[in-house]
Amino acid sequence: MRPRHPLLLAVLALPATAVITFRALAGSVAETVRDPATRGIGIVAIGIIFVATLFFHFVEGWGLLDALYYSVISLATVGYGDFVPTTALGKIGAIVMVAFGVGIIAVFFAGIASRASERAAQRAAAVRERIEERAGRVAQEAVSTDPGAGAEAGIAGVGGAAEVERQASEP
């Protein structure tokens, strides 16, 4: 069954797009963690979240989930304000956590973004290479089946479709 409305098609394609995007992001995170140059910063980032979670759990008396939530939201610089340290020690801890943690988290996520960008460029280059290869094969097939189309097919085979159109329109 073919969707009749473009919006319906977009809604139906959204889950597949989300899965592909998630797989690409997961691959970038995995590469970032595997790379010795960025593995250390990832371990430090996770360590900061872990220590901050325990700190707020014991100092502020929050549950572990609430303390983890506060730590992640604060380090992500979102800060909804639904959890706020009330003790002096908790406020000092929040200042220290944000002062050190935001930069480290930013560097870690920049590494992930860099990997994702590299992977996207590699995929685009591979697709471009396959397209050029197929265009070359089509040009060769055109030459072998219709010798008169050889020049036009050869030009199209190397990406000169506009040139072929220009030559065809000349008298």
Image: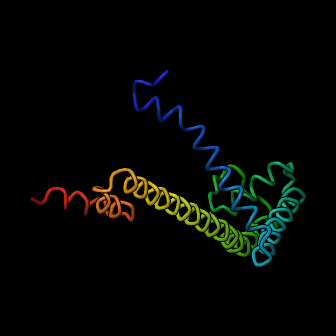
| Image quadrant where residue 150 sits | bottom left
Residue 160 as seen in the image, left or right of residue 68: left
Residue shown at 61%/70% (left/top)? 114
Residue shown at 88%/60% (left/top)? 54
Q: Position of residue 93 (x, y in %)?
A: 79, 69
Q: Residue furthest left?
A: 171
Q: Position of residue 41 (x, y in %)?
A: 77, 74
Q: Position of residue 31 (x, y in %)?
A: 74, 66
Q: Residue furthest top?
A: 1
Q: How many marks?
A: 0
| Image quadrant where residue 136 sits | bottom left
Which of the two residues, 89 or 116, is positioned nearer the viewer here?
116
| Image quadrant where residue 121 sits | bottom right
Looking at the image, what colour scheme do you see? rainbow
Quadrant where the C terminus is found in the figure: bottom left
Residue shown at 76%/61% (left/top)? 30
Residue 12 as seen in the image, left or right of residue 89: left
Which of the two residues, 21 or 62, is positioned nearer the viewer here?
21
Residue shown at 87%/53% (left/top)? 61
Residue 52 as seen in the image, left or right of residue 104: right
Which of the two residues, 102 or 130, is positioned nearer the viewer here?
130
Residue 137 as seen in the image, left or right of residue 123: left
Q: Position of residue 89 (x, y in %)?
A: 82, 68
Which of the two residues, 116 or 74, is positioned nearer the viewer here?
116
